Image (cartoon, rainbow, N blue to C red):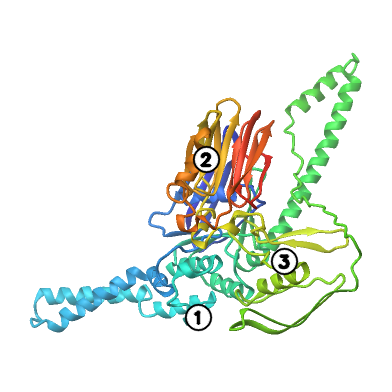
């Protein structure tokens, strides 16, 4: 039975067709993977399927009464509740039914007229409530909560902790846990393996294999897809292809399909070349002109095949070292790790890395992997600050990038790193929520005249110095307030309102923010002015602008992305 279906849907931006004639369907209890390169349109399609946006063409239909849950990538719980109470919320209807049953039991116990219709009706209602309670796992929901929390790495010591006190990765895992507990008919997960260690990932794979509802999963983790899904939709070049099987089977079938398409294309190109050659040689000869004209009509009627597009682009990067490394690259001897002597994460740590070795550091979340790497870098560079930290910003769909080198080795990069010159280093955890996008950015466009200024809270500033009146589009976290004023009054406006009208940061945290530093740019083409770790502003060509950011935060330009 089909529970969700997209029929010939299309999406267009500013007159440009992003994709069209896209169709897919999800069966009851289906195990569907949606794959494709970044920017192919997967997230756009997902938003159509859940009803967040409407297609420009085509239709989205859903089985009546279906219970659907969607978890966007890197979406963490934002709740004032404790961990356990938040999980209990997934069973609010069961808890309400349990209370109703207790009330019925009280009425039954206090009844005196056992022969009345009212008493018989009460017993009947109680029997039905018991049945519904059992069907909804009323007698086992607390055990289910404990099992799921344990699977995601939350033992009883976490139960009473406030969710707001947890890390972003922990809140992401809790969001997945709650979605599983709510047992929707269709569960849509966008990059669910982010923030999961190997033990938790293995547990999730097993859990989803036995999940009773349907699954639609977007992931770049081929091994995870191999174990969970049974069909693949491949989004590429504005089209959506369907394959039966897991990810490995999909790769085999796609390779065979591309090979077949290439052979058909090559064969047709040979035929076209022969026909064109015959036409060119014989069209002017009286004796052969009719045959040549026939060949020309054949060419005109021919449905031309497109050459298969190669989507396996590889970045080639070469590095050179100032000096050749010795055979012994790194030695870690009897290291103790922790935040202080009272909070030791690991003791007696020993590592040997030799030339051309490839070393993986694995372990559960929170065990001290990043702490160890930071300490190694600190010792190697003399830097007294942590230089590696994970973040939701800028929000990528990749959990890793592999860059192949010529000697059959790889550079493995994990996106989402906060660099030293990004805004996050100058904000409190409370203020970080104003710069870390939780949802898709909603651009805001301002019609600006020259000599006007925009303030992004008290964190940054944009001056439109010279140029024709134009629409200036800002891309920042949706909750970050943007205020407009005249350039001549901008300094006075900031001094008067920073920490109050211009938020964040608040007045008590304003002193922690370095003074804003001015960066002026003369723009000759449509350009993004990027404030590192905060967002960007798109400006038209032939303008003079200035971007202001806290001293130490980079302000740079790039060719406009949109």
Q: Where is residue 467 drawn, in percent x and y?
A: 61, 27
2 vs 1, front mark: 2
3 vs 2, front mark: 2
Left or right, 380 with respect to 480, comes to: right
Find disc 2 in the rendering and name its residue: 491
Which secondary structure, mark 3? loop
Which secondary structure, mark 2? helix
Find disc 3 in the rendering and name its residue: 383
Point out the image quarter for the C terminus.
Answer: top right
Which of pointers 3 and 1 lies earlier in the amino acid sequence? 1
Frontmost residue, 233 versus 472:
472
In this view, 144 is above or below 313: below
Find disc 1 in the rendering and name its residue: 155
Which of pointers 3 and 2 lies earlier in the amino acid sequence? 3
Which of pointers 2 and 1 lies earlier in the amino acid sequence? 1
* Residue 54 in view, yes or no: no
């Amino acid at each position: 039975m089909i529970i969700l279906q997209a029929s010939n849907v299309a999406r267009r931006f500013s007159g440009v067709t992003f994709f069209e004639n896209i169709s897919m369907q999800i069966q009851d209890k289906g195990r569907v993977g949606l794959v494709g390169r970044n920017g192919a349109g997967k997230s756009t399609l997902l938003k159509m399927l859940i009803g967040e946006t409407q297609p420009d063409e085509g239709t989205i239909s859903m089985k009546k009464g279906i219970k659907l849950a969607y978890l966007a990538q890197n979406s963490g719980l934002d709740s004032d509740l404790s961990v356990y109470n938040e999980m209990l919320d997934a069973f609010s209807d069961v808890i309400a039914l349990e209370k109703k049953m207790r009330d019925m039991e009280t009425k039954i116990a206090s009844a005196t007229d056992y022969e009345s219709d009212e008493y018989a009706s009460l017993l009947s209602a109680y029997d039905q409530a018991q049945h519904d309670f059992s069907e909804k796992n009323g007698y086992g929901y607390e055990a289910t909560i404990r099992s799921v929390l344990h699977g995601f790495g939350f033992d009883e010591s976490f139960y009473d902790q406030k969710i707001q006190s947890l890390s972003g990765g922990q809140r992401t895992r809790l969001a997945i846990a709650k979605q599983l507990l709510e047992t929707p008919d269709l569960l849509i997960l966008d990059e669910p393996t982010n923030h999961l260690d190997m033990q938790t990932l293995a547990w999730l794979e097993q859990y989803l294999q036995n999940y009773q509802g349907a699954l639609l999963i977007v992931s770049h983790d081929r091994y995870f897809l191999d174990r969970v899904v049974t069909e693949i939709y491949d989004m590429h070049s504005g089209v959506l292809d369907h394959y039966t099987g897991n990810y490995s089977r999909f790769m085999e079938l796609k390779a065979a399909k591309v090979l077949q398409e290439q052979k058909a294309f090559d064969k047709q190109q040979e035929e076209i070349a022969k026909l064109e050659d015959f036409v060119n040689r014989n069209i002017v000869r009286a004796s052969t002109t009719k045959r040549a004209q026939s060949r020309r009509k054949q060419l005109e009627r021919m449905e031309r095949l497109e050459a298969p597009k190669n989507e396996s682009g590889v970045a080639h990067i070469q590095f050179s070292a100032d000096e050749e490394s010795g055979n012994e690259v790194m030695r870690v001897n009897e290291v103790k790790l922790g935040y202080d002597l009272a909070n030791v994460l690991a003791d007696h740590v020993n590592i040997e890395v030799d030339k051309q070795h490839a070393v993986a550091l694995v372990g559960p979340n929170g065990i001290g992997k990043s702490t160890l790497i930071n300490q190694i870098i600190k010792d190697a560079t003399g830097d007294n600050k942590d230089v590696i930290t994970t973040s939701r910003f800028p929000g990528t769909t990749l959990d890793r990038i592999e860059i192949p080198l010529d000697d059959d080795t790889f550079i493995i990069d994990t996106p989402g790193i906060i660099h030293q010159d990004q805004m996050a280093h100058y904000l409190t955890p409370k203020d970080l929520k104003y710069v870390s996008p939780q949802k898709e950015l909603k651009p805001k466009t301002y019609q600006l005249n020259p000599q006007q200024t925009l303030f992004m809270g008290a964190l940054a500033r944009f001056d439109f110095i010279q140029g024709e009146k134009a629409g200036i589009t800002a891309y920042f976290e949706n909750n970050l307030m943007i205020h407009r004023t005249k350039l001549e009054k901008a300094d006075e406006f900031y001094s008067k309102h920073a920490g109050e009208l211009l938020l964040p940061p608040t007045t008590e945290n304003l002193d922690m923010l370095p003074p804003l530093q001015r960066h002026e740019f003369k723009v000759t083409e449509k350009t993004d002015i990027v404030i590192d770790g905060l967002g960007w502003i798109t400006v038209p060509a032939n303008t003079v602008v200035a971007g202001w950011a806290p001293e130490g935060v980079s302000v740079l330009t790039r060719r406009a992305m949109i």
